[in-house]
Amino acid sequence: MIVAKITQKQADELKGKEFVQDNYFNPIQDKNGNWIISLQELVYCGVEFANSVKLINYEPIEFTL
């Protein structure tokens, strides 16, 4: 899955902000420590913001029990 890689500062600014009614930005980190948001969230960030990020493959954190 392709996601948008953002900076920690961008993640801090977006976290918890509502982008449409009852939908909130939820930046997370992947297994490499990259802060990411979904492409669906990226659509609501504006052109300048969207042009400042890199698209990467999502690599989830794997947990073992």
Image: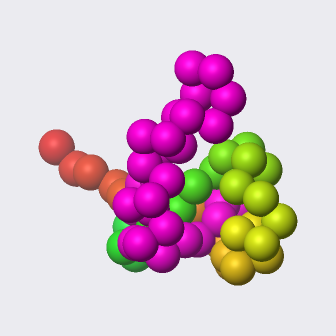
Q: Is residue 48 left or right of residue 24?
A: right
Asked whether residue 19 is drawn in magenta, I would say: yes
Looking at the image, which residue sits at the far top?
Answer: 22
The part of the image, by quadrant, that contains residue 21 is: top right
The residue that appears at 53% across and 62% down in the rendered structure is 36
Looking at the image, which residue sits at the far right?
Answer: 47
User: Where 65 sits versus 49, above or below?
Assistant: above
Q: Is residue 33 left or right of residue 38?
A: left
Q: How is the image coloured?
A: rainbow
Residue 30 shows in the view: no
Q: Nearer the viewer, residue 13 or 60?
A: 13
Image spot of residue 47 (x, y percent): 83, 65
The residue that appears at 67% across and 46% down in the rendered structure is 41
The part of the image, by quadrant, that contains residue 56 is: bottom right
Asked whether residue 23 is drawn in magenta, I would say: yes
Image spot of residue 9 (x, y percent): 41, 72
Residue 11 shows in the view: yes
User: Where 55 sits versus 44, above or below?
Assistant: below
Looking at the image, which residue sits at the far left?
Answer: 65
Q: Nearer the viewer, residue 7 or 46?
A: 46
The residue that appears at 67% across and 76% down in the rendered structure is 53
Provide the residue span drawn in magenta.
Answer: 1-29
Image spot of residue 10 (x, y percent): 49, 67
Image spot of residue 43 (x, y percent): 78, 50
User: Where 19 sits versus 15, above or below?
Assistant: above
How many badges with numbers are in the image?
0
| Image quadrant containing the N terminus | bottom right
